[in-house]
Amino acid sequence: MEREGKKYEEYAYVLDFLPHGKPGVPRHPYGRGLVQLIGEAFFTLLEAVPHRNVDFTVRERIYIGKFGRTKIDHVLGRISYDDLTSTAKAELPGVIETIVRSQEKRFIDFFNTSQPITPRMHSMELIPGIGKKLMWQILEQREKEPFKSFEDLQRRVNLPDPARLIARRILEELSREEKYLIFTRPM
């Protein structure tokens, strides 16, 4: 969702629930613990304060939009990969892959419409496992007919598990300084 030029997450997945807050950090004034989340639209890493007497399960999809939240009192803000707990970091790759698989059309559209970033580099080459040879095969096949699914892409260009490759790229964008961001937003 967009408000005044800013983009906000509507839904997020729980990466970790800290009912007593972060260890070694003074308790938050709200005293209700902390939830670490990843947004499903922009892969934004967030911390939020839960409503009282609410429990969370890791990998649970919850609503965090502006109005009608049932589990989150308020979102504290964006955090970096380094601010995640070890549990959240361990859950992150699987949750990202879940999001990618649940939004197959969005990511197939990337393969059908992506463009060069520079005269010598195509945005597809930023996906782990895709070099020049595979990129040219993908471009050639999408000219004939757009890809319909991950399975179609995999079958036509022999690309091993496209969803997992995209998830790896998203994790790279979140966990280290990348020159080009294709699926996430700058911090």
Image (cartoon, rainbow, N blue to C red):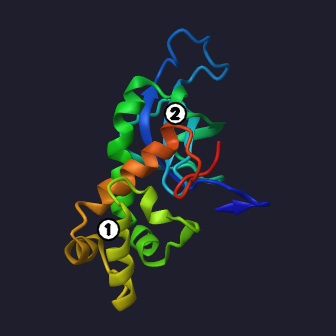
Q: Residue at x 37, y 48 (%)?
A: 168
Residue indicated by mark 1:
134
Where 75 sits versus 124, above or below? above
* Amino acid type, callout 2: Tyr
Q: Tag 1, which secondary structure?
A: helix
* Amino acid type, callout 1: Leu
Location of residue 187 in the rendering, given as x and y in whole percent from the top left corner: 65, 42
Horizontally, residue 135 falls left or right of residue 47, namely left
Residue 57 seen in render: no
Please tell me which residue lies in front, 130 or 17: 130
Where 158 sits versus 25, above or below? below
Residue indicated by mark 2:
81
Please tell me which residue lies in front, 152 or 77: 152
Q: Tag 2, which secondary structure?
A: helix
Sequence order check, earlier mark of 2 and 1: 2
* Direction right: furthest residue: 4
Location of residue 51 in the rendering, given as x and y in whole percent from the top left corner: 55, 35
Q: Residue at x 25, y 73 (%)?
A: 157
Residue 102 seen in render: yes
